[in-house]
Each structure stands twice: as structure tokens, then as C-alpha cells.
Amino acid sequence: MYYVFNINNNDYNFLDNYFISSKWHKFIYQNGNSGARSDRIAVKDVTFQNMPLILPKINEQEKIGSFFAKLDQLIDLQSKKVEQLKKLKHGYLQKMFPQKGESVPRLRFYGFSGEWEYKKISDISVSFSGGTPNISVTSYYNGEIPFIRSGEIDSKNTKINISEEGLKNSSAKLVDKGTILYALYGANSGEVSISKINGAINQAILAIKVNDYCNNIYIYNLLSYKKNYIVRKYLQGGQGNLSGKIINSLLLNIPQKQEQQKMGLFFNKLDQLINLQSQKEYNLRKIKQSYFQRLFI
């Protein structure tokens, strides 16, 4: 499965980043064998050994290798910052929501007291799922309505748009920006987000609109915190699907509206900070990709 080799008289960091880049892929595609899988390319050892490389002199290799090493350090530091913020949020989630068998959290904002209530999601919201327009009818697609699928609940963009005709002739349902979206099945079952766009949803998503008793961001964070519990209980071994019936029957710890709002505002600011730092990491990775194109032949 793996071809292992040592290098002689060349800079390791330079070649390491060269092979991380895509500059050598064209040779592999032209000289490899895809077999039955078009997304997999196999090459013989001798073919790889004979791959031509255009290399600068060793001192320039070292300069380029050192540059990428420093850039990798920046990316690594930024990645660790993001992970630390995510761990910080998880720690607050654990402390600011009551644990199993408890009616009050261990950490609370000043001025709030009293026990929290247990309420079913169905008691505090209305919910619905969508559907998918017939894929064989071309006029149902390439319209102006973003079509949100379960893997896109946290995205500002969708790969597919549907038309008004597709919406009217299917079970797809419109959702507004700010609606809680819950992934019922697929690779990201149990994931929850707040819609960043107006669009339509398919059958793999449950849209949850909370009533005036609850704060949207609070409920989103609580459902996000409960993801592991929900998946363990209802998707044993990764098998099976969630459903609107299951989600609507979940019992949630609910404080008074003012405390929900306070917590929602706190977690929203923490999410904004995480997103900001994640964007910085993303930008650094894009910069590295750009230099791959400019520094390698």
C-alpha cells in the first residue's frame, strides 16, 4: 500500500511539502492505473521511481523548506488555539447545564436561582422535515432556492438549488435563517446548527422553531451538548436513523427565559470567537496552498 524511500542530497522539508502539494499528481494520473475505481490511482514502484522532478539547487530547497516549516508552525499554533477554545466551550457546557439527576447547574450567572424544569421538545416548539424533488425532472432544479441537505446545516452555501416548481411538487419545506436544523440521518446524524440562510430542507433534516418560552440559541447549544447521549442511545453501533418522533420526545432542562437569554448570549459570543479563529486557520491553509502553486514547478 505504501512506497517508502529515503532522500539523498536534497532538503526533506522541501520534498515533504512538494508531495503534500498536487504538483506531481498529473504524472500519476497519466502513468497510473485507476482500475475499477475512478477515484483511486495505483502506480508501480518503478513508475514512481521514474517520476521526473524539477528541483532547484539545495540552498534554494532549504530556503523554501524553511519557509514552509515556519508557515506550518503558524498553522499548528492557530489550530491549537481553535481546539483550546472548543475545549473551553465544552467545559462551560458541562458546568452550565445540569448533569443527569440534577435540577440546577454547577455554574450559573449571578442573580439566577431556583430549579430548572424538564420539558419535551414538542412542548416548546413546532417541528417539521422536508423532502427531495424528483431528480429526474430537470425543471425542479437549478432554481433560486438553496436546497439544504444534512451535511450543509452549518453552511452558508449549498451545492444544489431547487426551483419554485420543484418546491411546489415535492415535500421540500422552506426554512428561515435562524431556524434550528437537526440532522436526522446520514453521516452527521445528531449534528445540530442554526440555519445561516433562507432555503429549503430535505427529509434528512428536522427544522425546530421554538416558542416564546425559549431562547433559540440556548436550545441549539443544549441539543449540541446532548449529541453524544442521543447518538449512543438511539444509534447503537452507528446503525439506524433518528426521527422527528425521537427528537420531539427528548426531555430538556429549561430555566426561566431570562437565564436562557443570558446563556445564549454567552455561548453565541464564544461561538463567534471560535469561528473567527477558525477562519484565521483556514486563511493560513489557503495561503500555504497558494505558495504551493507559486514556489513549485
Image (cartoon, helix red, strand yellow):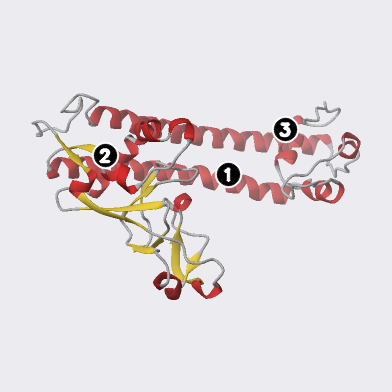
Between marks 3 and 2 in the image, the one whose residue lies nearer the viewer: 2
Q: Earlier in the sequence, mark 3 or mark 1?
A: 3
Q: From the top left corner, tell me how far across and down residue 163 is, in percent.
A: 46, 73
In the rendered image, which quarter is residue 97 located in?
top left
Residue named by callout 1: 285
Amino acid type at mark 1: Arg
Horizontal side, residue 1 vs residue 173: left or right: right
Which element type, helix, strand or loop, lies under badge 3? Answer: helix
Q: Position of residue 171 (x, y in %)?
A: 39, 64
Viewer-nearest of discs 1 and 2: 2
**Residue 257 percent across, percent down from the top left:** 13, 45
Q: What label does residue 155 carry, if any?
A: none
The one nearer the camera, 46 or 252, is: 252
Look at label 3 and name its amino acid: Asn
Inspect this view and state whether residue 178 appears: yes
Contact (Cβ within 8 Å) of mark 3 with mark 1: no
Residue at horizontal 51%, vertical 63%? 160
Q: Earlier in the sequence, mark 3 or mark 2?
A: 3
Q: Which quadrant of the rendered structure holds the N terminus?
A: top right
Of 213 and 234, nearer the camera is 234
Give the tally of numbered discs.
Answer: 3
Q: Which mark is residue 250?
A: 2
Whole-Å distance between the Cαs marked 3 and 2?
52 Å
* Figure quadrant of residue 285: top right
- Residue for point 80% across, 27% down: 4
- Taking 126 as reference, is 115 above or below it? above
Vertical side of 195 occupied by 134: above or below = below
Q: Secondary structure at mark 2?
A: loop
- The residue singled out by tag 3 in the image is 13
Dot 1 or dot 2, earlier in sequence = 2
Q: Amino acid at mark 2?
A: Leu
